[in-house]
Image (cartoon, rainbow, N blue to C red):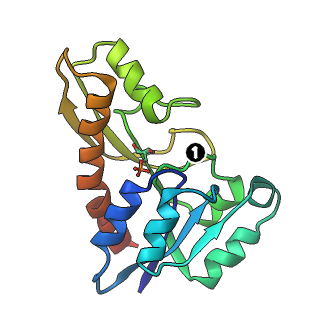
Amino acid sequence: MKHIAIFATGGGSNAQKIIEHFENHETIKVSLIISNKKTAGVLEKAAVKNIPTLIINREEFYQTENIILKLDAFQIDFIVLAGFLWLMPTYMVKIYAKKVVNIHPALLPKYGGKGMYGMNVHRAVHAAKEAESGMTIHYVNEHYDEGGIIFQAKCSLLLTDSPDDIANKVLQLEHRYYPPVIESLILEI
Ligand code: GRF
């Protein structure tokens, strides 16, 4: 069995799709959900599915490597970020080289970098009157949104689309493609 840990801070709709995708998988299991926010919606979703959860704080995450012991205890092979906003510490990126992926709600390298998350991204895309947007799945390094791109999917935008409309279109692409792309990456390791 290969074990996934999902890091998430927000509502966790992507985490939910990933959990469902691997629910009856023969060789891949979502074994741990990690969040930096006690009230994150993803924690309830994990509880419903009986998936262990872990809340982390900033000091522990950046100043110690304690989290590696916890990941080891759950035999975690692969880390999925789904709406997790903290940068990965260097030790994590080294230990899990090419085994940490993130999803970004735009077509990187455009609309990425510090501060470009959530509705900030969709508002910027809207303000620029882009004809298309989309999602990017990429490897994670110590910089925001800069790891190698693994997969992108696009959607067309209408001039009448509001930032919320853009967010909905992009989120649908995320839900559709993130779970199978994760699966194919894990099947290769
Ligand atoms: C997604 O748009 C993802 O691209 C970004 O954060 C959002 C998370 O949404 N990294 P959810 O918590 O999975 O609903």
Q: Is residue 99 visible?
A: no
9 over 74 or under it: above or below:
above
Mark 1 lies on residue: 85
Q: How many numbered dots are placed on residues in this image?
A: 1
6 over 139 or under it: above or below:
below
Which residue does the image show at 34% across and 12% down from the upper left? 128
Query: Circle 1: is it few (<14), some (14-19), or many (20+) Cα within 10 Å?
Result: some
User: Where residue 119 sits in the image (x, y, percent)?
Assistant: 43, 30
Q: What element carries label 1?
A: loop
Amino acid type of the residue tagged 1 in the rendering = Leu
In the image, 159 versus 184, the foreground residue is 159
In the image, 107 versus 174, the foreground residue is 174
Which residue does the image show at 29% across and 66% down from the upper left? 184
User: Where residue 86 sits in the image (x, y, percent)?
Assistant: 63, 47
Which residue does the image show at 64% across and 56% down from the upper left? 36
Which quadrant, please, contains the C terminus? bottom left
Q: Does the residue labelled 1 lie within 8 Å of ligand 1?
A: yes
